[in-house]
Amino acid sequence: RRCGQVHGACGVWGLLAVGLFDRGGGLLPTGSGRLLGSQALGALVLAALGCGGAAAAAGTLRWLGVLRVSREQEESGLDSEFGLKAYSRNNDVLQRCRTVSALLSENGFSALDLFDALVSLRGVVYRTFTPQAADHKLEGEVKDILQHLSYDSLGGQDGRPHLAFLSHHKADAGDAARIFVDTARRLLASQPFLESAGLGPRAEEAVRRVKPQDLVWLDSTNLKELPTLLDVVASSCNHILFLTRAALERPWVLAELVAAHTLGKYVCLVLLEWPGATEERLREFQFPAALERTIHEWAWFLSKEAPARHKRDGEGELRRRVTTAASSWHTSASADSSHHIRRTPSEDARFSRQLPLTAMSLGPAGPRSGKAAKRVPLPSVALQRPESYKASVSSLAEEEGDASAADGA
């Protein structure tokens, strides 16, 4: 466009200006329009020669199939052929996705598993937590989160040793996570809270049997071995994810999310808020825009570099699965208020009781054959060895395969 404005429009004006202002034959000095007409005709002839020649050359190249580069080269940028990075964002996203994908593969997952987990977050009602709030407000927010967790499988001989696993980005939410954990452990050890929360006698007894320090597990307790953390995820009844600006870019946070999603954990999203503090608010997660951006980044990555293990289902099927989920955000995001609707406590308690310890058995683009998704009970998982986690995932996959075969029959 700018080339046309500078070279085209200015060049035409240069020709017409001679016909207007030339002292020997210009329209304004002499009143004769002969020179102006000649100049205008010359401008048309030059435009026809330039456009006609360019159109003929471009048409020939297009017919030969060499006018445009491939779609992959367009997305990565032509400068990538020379090792340059003019499109820095795309290169940064690609590198980050490759790093996370490699980490997931080392622990028995795939980028497509992560994509499914991210898409599932669209349907999760988030809670808020204000770490700098007054004590009564802070306790109220922690109580609200604790009341909507699942206590059904906590404690006991066959129960899980942890009520919740707290996943967060330490740089942005380390202080908030510690405040939350300390407050939650104090409340869970308080008899007045257990009586007012309406958890039921069985849940109250299960909470009492578990040590307070084991009720809510903070992921930063162990930052050396990811398989050990994934074992703790598997041994927890719920998965709490603190959302801050870079939480969904952290490899270990994403791996923990995939593990929780694969094992059918009840995922509780907590949106951290720092009202009034300008610098602190830079750490906040912009919901739902940041979630949708992350989903689209992984959809773009999957369309470019689909892992070989998923190509057995056919590249077309994989692309359909990704594009279907990625494009659906237009309808979900258009009703922006739906992301901020809070269920009543009774509705959310019923919702949380339906989700824990189950896995949604989905086909490539949704429930199989249009039927309601089946819930597959998960096996109990030991905490001692990292291999137990992978064994649990393998067991779940086998059970889902059996359910799929029975459904097909």
Image (cartoon, rainbow, N blue to C red):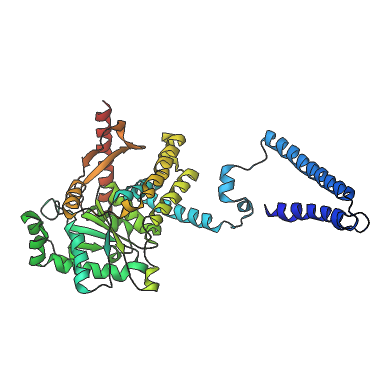
Q: Nearer the viewer, residue 401 or 339?
A: 339
The residue lying toward the viewer, choosing from 61 and 332, is 332
Return the x and y of residue 32 as percentages of the image width and height.
Answer: 89, 51
Instruction: Determine which quarter of the picture holds residue 374.
Output: top left
Lateral position of residue 127 relative to residue 309, left or right: left
Viewer-closest of 308 and 298: 298
Residue in the foreground of this view, choosing between 332 and 65: 332
Total marks in image: 0
Can the viewer see residue 182? no
**Image quadrant containing the C terminus:** top left
Q: Where residue 134 sits in the image (x, y, percent)?
A: 23, 74
Which residue is farthest left?
201
| Image coords of residue 166 (percent x, y) | 26, 61
Who's the residue at 72% across and 35% down the image? 60
Which of the 4 image quarters holds residue 53?
top right
Can you give x and y, in whole percent of width and height, for residue 392 in the image?
Answer: 25, 46
